[in-house]
Amino acid sequence: MKLTSTLIATLLFSGVASAHNVWLEPESNTGEIQRYVVKFGHEQTEFYPQAKLKRVRYIDEQGQVQDTTFEFNAKQGDKGEAVVGDKGAKIYYTLFNNGIWSKLPSGKYVEKTKREVPNAEFSINPIKLSKSIVKWDDDAMKYHHMDYELVPLSKPEAGKALDILVLKQGKPVQGIKVGLGEEQPFNLSNAQGIAQFIPTQGFNKVWAEFEEKVAGNPDYSDRSYEYMLTFDVP
């Protein structure tokens, strides 16, 4: 089958920047305080520069948002993985900036700004957000004043449709894809900002994407926010 140049470019960008996500996975045998590894990747995980992980926050036992620090373990040169662990943490939020990627006339994507490659067809800044629910209580079903957020409206059960509220700046958003991933089945959020997801037993990843145009920035014209909500279902 012959692929068009547009399709090839789309697939290439999905591989290097767009389709990647961040999420947390628990470390094993961590002692009194559970620690979590900040993962990055798509079909396979990849190491990343520490500078791209901009912030980690968590919800404490009182339901308050707290900033936290992370330990970064270099694995390949300056690339590695971060680890976090906080007593009483119930939910973690991460902010990961995957740089600026530009599409060249050849269809190839490079990690350069529009100013660095003025002939680029467009340049995009892919931001990766994650929300990891590590303990279920009422706070797991509340909005915690993040700019972008997916809020499950009930405790998930395997095989039972779960309503998820999609919010931007605290307001419901219609037409956002919510599903298993960029190349996987999805549902669109409705007029009330609600999309349904069918959880399975074990570790669940719920993907969503927000896109926006950026005016007046000489380095890029578009920004995407890929969001990953994760939780366990017994």
Image (tube, helix red, strand yellow):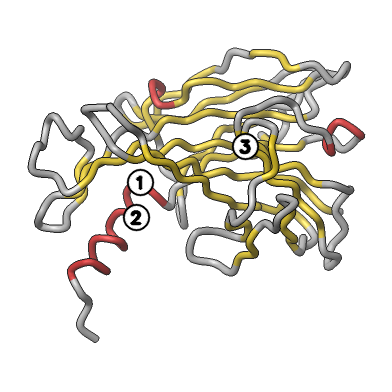
Tag 2: amino acid: Gly
Determine whether the residue tagged by mark 3 lies in a helix, strand or loop: strand
Q: Read off the residue under disc 1.
A: 17
Mark 3 nearby-residue class (10 Å; few <14, some 14–19, many ≥20):
some
Q: Is residue 186 above or below residue 218?
A: below
Mark 2 nearby-residue class (10 Å; few <14, some 14–19, many ≥20):
some
The quarter of the picture where the C terminus appears is bottom right
Q: How far apart, in angstroms, are the residues tagged by discs 3 and 1? A: 22 Å
Q: Read off the residue under disc 3.
A: 168
**What residue lies at 30% left-to-right and 54% top-to-bottom?**
13
Residue 79: quadrant of the picture: top left
Q: Is residue 39 above or below residue 83?
A: below
Q: Read off the residue under disc 2.
A: 15
In the image: residue 203, left or right of residue 74? right
Tag 1: amino acid: Ala
Badge 3 or badge 1: first in the primary sequence = 1
